[in-house]
Amino acid sequence: MAAVDKLLRTMLDQGGSDLHLTVGLPPKARISGALKPISTGSIDAATMEMMLQEIVTKHRWQEFLERKDLDLAHEIPGVARFRANFLYNHWGQAAVFREIPVKIRSFAELKLPEALKKLCHLSEGLVVVTGPTGAGKSTTLAAMIDYINSNLSRHIITIEDPIEFVHQNKKSIIVHREVGDHTESFAAALKGAMRHDPDILLLGEMREMETIKLALSCASMGMLVFGTLHTNNAPKTVDRMINAFPAEEQNQVRVMLSSCLVGVVAQLLCKRVPSGRCAVHEILLTHEALPNTIRSGQIANIRSIIESGGNDGMITMDNSLLNRVKDNTIAPKEAYMKAANKALFQPMLKPGDLENLD
């Protein structure tokens, strides 16, 4: 058994989600949100190189040595799949592995808001699922694609780097494409997808201006496009997409975005009481005022649109946090740390909570 596989099994046995390997430190895993050592003894440079090289092909290893960075998927058959990143840092080679659950969890299992099903039934437009790294965006998107796969007949193309969740065809046809192995880049895959008669495109990440522009074009052509970004709320998501372009192109992008943006789902993970983690969401859905708000650049008004759309399933992140505090899913201190309007949660804090906000 590969040395990395032994560590990954140990991590899973202890309930961890991410394995961190760095020269000079013992292997550490993220368990209930905190990094903890899972083995004694630090990793030296030679051992690190052996461990990483052992689980990749010669071609991918050479690619890592040349680029100093490598994304890949790694699988322990019958156990789990992992999204991995090899990198160089100040101390030498390093790696991070994140578990990709073999079983795709459903809406009910994840307790996702029912409003997200509305997005699954759309026939066209751009839906952005956003949040910081490790917020569970891929898990939520997988549940949404699985819901479509189980209930609707669609042709779905996923473009990822690397492929994470592997869906089995149910009512829909799902084609997985991995950047690097199946296509040169996100942009090349998107250009090709326009000729493949898709109903739905899923982009692992809208990293660059060209990818965002192509995603907008596909959505404008009548496809339903799901993509991800690393922003914390709906207004910042709209700003991020517009500001990815040069100033002279931003007016055109606003017009395109105003006509095709049909949903933003911002997600955060919080520490659950007494243990584990749960997701909280900010949800922006289509609204008659949204296109003009985006076209005119009045992005701050998106907050008012969300607040007025509660009956349609829209909700702000702070209200989502408040609901989780009221049903005792998360502690007031946790909500306070994640909230934009901290004054909303300050009266709920216990004496001493503000003295130790770790």
Image (spheres, rainbow, N blue to C red):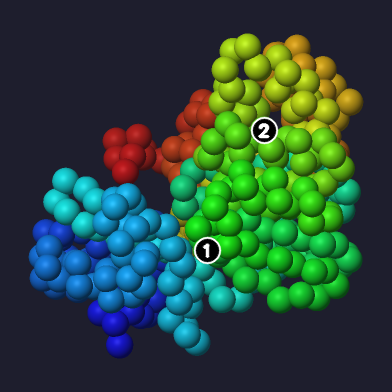
**What type is the residue that disc 2 sits on?**
Lys
> Residue 181 — which label?
1
Count of labels shown? 2
Q: Quadrant of residue 97?
A: bottom left
Q: Residues within 10 Å of mark 1 (few under 14, many from 20)?
A: few
Q: Quadrant of residue 288?
A: top right
State the residue at coordinates (65%, 17%): 249
> Residue 265 — which label?
none
Q: Residues within 10 Å of mark 2 (few under 14, many from 20)?
A: many
Measured as percent of width and height from the top left, residue 31 is found at 36, 64
From this view, report whether residue 52 is shown above or below residue 309: below
Tell me the quadrant of the picture where the C terminus can be found.
Answer: top left
SS assignment at label 1: loop
Q: Nearer the viewer, residue 153 or 305?
A: 153
Tell me the quadrant of the picture where the N terminus can be found.
Answer: bottom left
Measured as percent of width and height from the top left, residue 199 is found at 83, 54
Measured as percent of width and height from the top left, residue 229 is found at 57, 40
Give the left or right position of residue 140, taking residue 284 as reference.
left
SS assignment at label 2: helix
**What type is the residue that disc 1 sits on?**
Asp
